[in-house]
Amino acid sequence: MARRIEIELTSKLEDGRFTWRAAGAREPRGTLVEALVPSGAKIGEILRAEVDSGLDGVDVLSIVPRKEPSPVDLRGKQIEIIGPPRVEAGVQVTLAQKGRGRRHDGPRDDSRQDRPPRDAKGAKPRRGAPGPSAGGGPSAPRAERPRPDRTRPPREDARPPKGRGSGPERRGAPDRRDSRRPQELAVSTTHRNALLATLRPEQLPIAEQLLRGGLPAVRQAIDEQNRAALALGRPTIAPETILTIADDLLPLTTLAAWKDRAAAVQHAGPTVRLRDLRAAVTAARTVTLDEEARGVLKELQGQLHTKTEELRTQWVTKVESLLEKGEVVAALSVVSRAPDPGTRCPAALATSLAEAAGKALDGDLTPTAWIAVLDAVVASPMRRSVHPAGIPAAQEAQAAAVRAAGHVPALAKLLGMRIPPPPPPSSAKRPALSGRRPS
C-alpha cells in the first residue's frame, strides 16, 4: 500500500538518478529517476513523495506537491483577546542586609529597657557579678581581663577526625585500590559494525535482529509486523523469504559477536575474570571460525591455561600455609572453594588435611567448637576420608554427629549405628549441622 512521506535529496549520480533518504534519517534509502524530480530541485531539498515498501526496499512512485497552508486556517497566527485591561499587583522585593542585623526594624519595646545591661561584646552579666549599681564599681571589660592559657600540646598519637579530614594528608594519600582486581568487560561492537556496513539495505534489519537474539528474535519481529499489518488492514509478509536470508546471515553475525567478545577479553588483559575468559573459549565451539578467529582462540586458550594454573598454585599454597599454622577450619573452608570446578586437591595434601581434621574432631572439645569443625569437614571434598578422634557427650554434639553420619561414614562407627546412604549430590547447599537456621 502506497503512503506519503517527506524525503531529502542527498546526491546526484552520474547516470542522472538522485539518491534520497527520509527527512531526518541517517543514511540514504534508495534512488529515483530524474524524471520524477521537479525541475529546479537542489541537493538537500525536502520533497513530499508517494512511496511503496516491498522486499527489495522502498520505491518512490511519484513526487506530490507540498501542502500549502490555507488562507482561512488560523493556526500559527496570534489570537488577540479583546477586553478591558487588567491591572495586576506588582511584586515587591526587599533585600536583606549583610551580616547579623536586628530582626525588627520597628520601635524598641519599652519592656526591654528593664533588662540588665550587656557588656561591650553584648554578653549578659554572670550571676553574682557586681554590676554598676551594686556598689562595687564598674567591672573591667572582658577583653582586658587576663585569660589563663588553656591550650594543650597535641598528642603524638592523635589521629585526624573522621569524615572531615580532607586536608593535604588525605589528598596525597596513596590509592589503595588493587589494580589486579577483575573488572567488568568493556563492550565492543567493532566487528559487528564492520559486518553491518557490508550488508545490503534489505539485510540490515534482519542482521540487527540476529545480533539481538538470533533466529527467535527474527521470528518474533515477523510476528509483530504481521499483527500490526492485520490491525491496519495491510497485507502480511511471508516469513519464508526472510528466514532464508536469516539462515545465510546467522554464521556471519555469530562470528562477529564472538570476535567482539574475544576482543573485550583481550583488552582486559591479566585482570580479566576467569569466568569471562572460559565463557569466550567455550562459546567458540558454536561458531564457524575463520583464520583470524582461530588465531585469537588459540591465544585465549593459552591465557586460560596460564590463569587456571596460577589460581590453582595460589589455592594450594594458601591451604598448605593454613595447615602448617594449625588453622584446620580455615584450611577446610579454603579447600572447599576451588578456583575452578575441575581443580582437584593434590593427593598428599588431601591426606594431610583429612588427618588433621580427624585430630581436630576431638571429644574433649566443647560442643560448639566441635560442631564448627564438623561443619567445615562436611563442606570439604575429603569428608568421607576423615576419621574423627571422638564425639563430645553433649546431646547437641551427638545429634549433629547423627545428622552428619551420611557425609562422614566414620561417625557412624563411633555412634555404633549402621552407615546411612550418602545424600544425593543434587543438593546445592547442605544444611548446618548445629540445627540453627542460617542468618
Image (cartoon, rainbow, N blue to C red):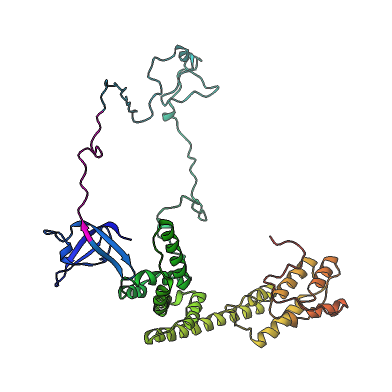
Residue 389 falls in which quadrant of the image? bottom right
In the image, residue 106 above or below residue 311: above
Name the spot of residue 238 as percent of width and height, x first.
Answer: 42, 70
The answer to which of 181 and 364 lies nearer the viewer is 181
Q: Main secondary structure of the magenta part?
A: loop
Q: Is residue 128 visible?
A: yes
Image quarter (top left, top right, bottom left or bottom right) of the N terminus: bottom left
Reply yes or no: does residue 95 show up in magenta. Answer: no
Reply yes or no: does residue 67 show up in magenta. Answer: yes
Q: Is 369 on the left or on the right of 248, as rendered?
A: right
Name the spot of residue 63 as percent of width and height, x first.
Answer: 21, 58
Residue at 67% in and 87% down: 348
Q: Is 198 on the left or on the right of 338, as rendered?
A: left
Residue at 43% in and 63% down: 226
Name the spot of residue 61 as percent of width and height, x first.
Answer: 24, 63
Furthest toward the right, the residue is 416
